[in-house]
Image (spheres, rainbow, N blue to C red):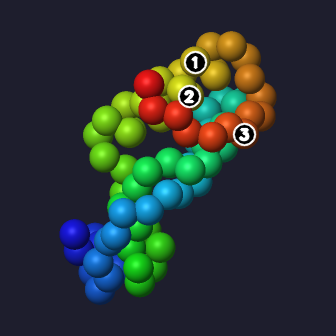
Amino acid sequence: MKCVICNNGETEPGRATMTLERDETTLVIKDVPAEICQNCGGKYFDEETTDELLKIAETAVAAGVQVDVRKYVAA
């Protein structure tokens, strides 16, 4: 797909690191499947992956996690 960030690059399947912050929680999730722009590095996550990332974040916030680094594992 054409990158909507730079409008020049094409995306290719790859793995990315996503950092999510909410309130006092910082969550770093590594090895997340994504489409990555080969020109600017923009990252795009599909709907299923995004839903899973949000569930992980909600669980971490509810548990009172301050900082966590984990590897992505699809449910």
Q: Amino acid at mark 1?
A: Thr
Task: Bin the neighbour count of mark 1 within 10 Å (Cα to Cα): few under 14, some 14-19, many 20 and up.
Answer: few
Q: Is residue 53 visible?
A: yes
Tell me the quadrant of the picture where the N terminus can be found.
Answer: bottom left
Q: Tell me the residue that label 2 is attached to.
A: 57
Q: Amino acid at mark 2?
A: Ala
Does the residue at mark 3 contact the one at mark 1 (Cβ under 8 Å)? no
Q: Is residue 65 above or below residue 29?
A: above
On residue 59, the disc is 1
Residue 10 falls in which quadrant of the image? bottom left
Q: Is residue 6 above or below residue 52?
A: below
Does the residue at mark 1 contact the one at mark 2 (Cβ under 8 Å)? yes
Q: Tell me the residue that label 3 is attached to.
A: 69
| Picture coordinates of residue 27, whole percent (x, y) | 66, 37
| Picture coordinates of residue 6, whole percent (x, y) | 35, 80
Task: Bin the neighbour count of mark 3 within 10 Å (Cα to Cα): few under 14, some 14-19, many 20 and up.
Answer: few
CA separation in Å, label 3 and label 1 = 14 Å
Which of the pair 3/12 is nearer the observer? Answer: 12
CA separation in Å, label 2 and label 3 = 11 Å
